[in-house]
Image (spheres, helix red, strand yellow):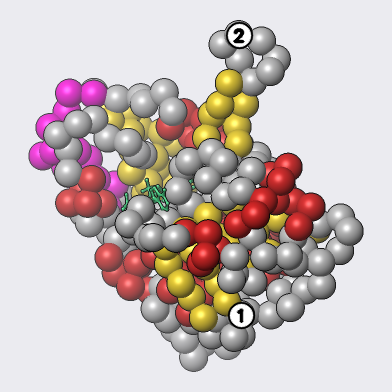
Amino acid sequence: MVAPPSVPLLLDGRALADSLRTKHAPDVAWLKEAGRTPRLVVLQVGADEAAQAYIRGQRRGAEAWGLSYEVRTLPADSGEAAVRRAIRALNADRAVTGILLSLPLPEGLGVRALQHTIDPEKDVEGVHPENLGGCFRGRGLLPCTALAAVALIEMSGVALEGAEVVVVGHSDIVGKPVAMLLLGRDATVTVCHKFTTGLAAHTRRADVLVVAVGKPGLIRGDMVKEGAVVVDVGINAVPSDEGPGRMRLVGDVAFEEVAPRVAAITPVPGGVGPVTVAMLMRNTVLAARGIPPPDDPNQLPLFAH
Ligand code: NAP
């Protein structure tokens, strides 16, 4: 295990996102030269306020990576059939190499059914069952946040083989895929959720703790093992000291209490978020290029640093 230093290693998501972009720049250049510029289209139904920050981040990411990016907005009162038609049109459009269905959707629309309509080869968020299944083998268009969490763990230098990993949160798009990917690295993985009793007893055993819940302050200082690696996926807006009505972003981990005890930790913001966007861009490049078969010597590595 990584020895606890006096100052924890801050796992800098922005630096990791930059290195992913640099690593894939030749792929983007090659695709552009071949007349196959990766093109990501985001479909939103209405314009949910909370989703706009993620969309702004995606747009900045696409610009930095040199990818084509467009947001298409359907009226908020669109029925499921209309959304399905729009997705099928994107599936059929050869110039579109990546499709992302922005969440949340207005009430009454079936998220899963619509996500399953996306062509798995253009599903750059990794939400189609075919791609979620790819987490079993660690290849394909995998869920971006799960990839980001694993890449940040790798950045810490911790040895995953045999490590006790605890994942808090078992959503289909973060917690479960992270658990699968880390099982694939031969870690011993425990997944905790809302019905887990004695959460602290689990988290205190973790050499690597991944938290993806959406509850600020869920993980306190006395809930982590000395010298652990902590990846905080949560993003929560809480009132800021800077004045009435001002908000700031925090994770699920009480950073000030936890950081002094651990070997490495992700900040919020600046940890998982920027790497998630970079993984989305990377998936868009992979989708445009075509995922090489496993025995192809040119196969891109799962992670790029
Ligand atoms: P989600 O679908 O709401 O899942 C949250 C998970 O936490 C569920 O499995 C839930 O269990 C579990 N949970 C709820 N209360 C709990 C508790 N007290 N103790 C343990 N587990 C509990 O959310 P998500 O999409 O996975 O996202 C989780 C967080 O990550 C959110 O803050 C989200 O904003 C953030 N996020 C960040 C990024 C990024 O790029 N940084 C990307 C995606 C998500 P049940 O299913 O039983 O309710």
Q: In the image, 31: left or right of 198?
A: right
Look at the numbered disc 1 and say if its residue's Cβ is closer than 8 Å to ligand 1.
no
Residue 163, label in figure: 1
* Place of residue 89 in the rendered image (x, y in percent of width and height, measured from the top left): 23, 45
- Foreground residue, 71 or 77? 77
Compared with 73, 136 (above or below) is: below
Query: Which amino acid lies under the numbered mark 1 shown in the image of this protein?
Result: Ala
* Place of residue 278 in the rendered image (x, y in percent of width and height, measured from the top left): 59, 52
Dot 1: within a 10 Å radius of its alpha carbon, few (fewer than 14), some, or many (20 or more) residues? some
Residues rendered magenta in the picture? 76-92
The quarter of the image holding the N terminus is bottom right
The kind of secondary structure the magenta stretch mainly shows is helix
* SS at mark 2 in the image: loop
Residue at (48, 75) in percent of width and height = 189
Residue highlighted by disc 2:
244
Q: Can residue 101 be seen in this view?
A: yes
Find out whether residue 278 is within the magenta segment.
no
- Foreground residue, 95 or 167? 167
Compared with 14, 200 (above or below) is: below
Query: Which amino acid lies under the numbered mark 2 shown in the image of this protein?
Result: Pro
